[in-house]
Image (cartoon, rainbow, N blue to C red):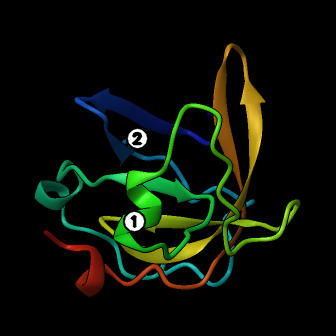
């Protein structure tokens, strides 16, 4: 990342810490709760960040009938932004990008970043 942040990936969790003395990135969305600074001890608490493509509600029989070539329609439209979730709580929307040899996400907006909802 090119945002003056340290990123650590451990066991599937992403931990992002502000570098000491680093300023808030200029590209930070205005909707994010940037004014409330986290105490140093809380900055290393791991959270699970997921990008949700969509979902489908099916019956148990339909689940039993799923095979290797099955296609299930999801409730999201192709090309629509995907939902960013932290510990299962929606915090914004993003699109999938390629970052080197891995997939990444490009944040479109952050509108639900509420630490009370995502704290374990």
Front residue of 72 and 64: 64
65 relative to 13, above or below: below
Q: Give the percent coordinates (x, y) of residue 118.
A: 27, 74
Question: Quadrant location of the N terminus?
Answer: top right
When asked about the image quadrant of residue 37, the answer is: bottom left
Q: Secondary structure at mark 1?
A: helix
Look at 77% across and 66% down and name the residue there: 81
Look at 47% across and 63% down and name the residue there: 62
Q: Which mark is residue 90?
A: none
Q: Give the percent coordinates (x, y) of residue 80.
A: 83, 68
Front residue of 112 and 57: 57
Front residue of 44 and 78: 78
Q: Is residue 57 left or right of residue 105?
A: left
117 relative to 88, above or below: below
Pointer 1 residue: 61
Pointer 2 residue: 19
Q: Earlier in the sequence, mark 1 or mark 2?
A: 2
Q: Give the percent coordinates (x, y) of residue 17.
A: 35, 45
12 relative to 18, above or below: above
For the residues labelled 1 and 2, the Cα–Cα distance comes to: 52 Å
User: Callout 1: 10 Å neighbours few (<14), some, many (20+)?
Assistant: few
Q: Is residue 104 left or right of residue 4?
A: right
Look at 13% across and 68% down and name the residue there: 120
Q: Is residue 7 left or right of residue 116?
A: right
Look at 68% across and 75% down and name the residue there: 75
Q: Secondary structure at mark 2?
A: loop
């Amino acid at each position: 990342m090119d945002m003056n942040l340290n990123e650590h990936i451990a066991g599937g969790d992403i931990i992002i810490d502000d570098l000491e003395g680093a300023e808030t990135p200029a590209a930070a969305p205005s909707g994010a709760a940037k004014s409330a600074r986290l105490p140093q001890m809380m900055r290393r608490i791991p959270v699970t960040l997921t990008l949700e493509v969509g979902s489908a509600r099916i019956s148990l029989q339909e689940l039993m009938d799923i095979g290797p070539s099955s296609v299930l329609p999801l409730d999201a439209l192709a090309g629509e932004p995907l939902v960013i979730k932290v510990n299962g709580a929606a915090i914004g929307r993003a699109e999938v990008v390629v970052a080197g040899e891995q997939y990444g996400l490009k944040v479109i907006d952050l509108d639900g970043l509420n630490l009370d909802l995502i704290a374990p």
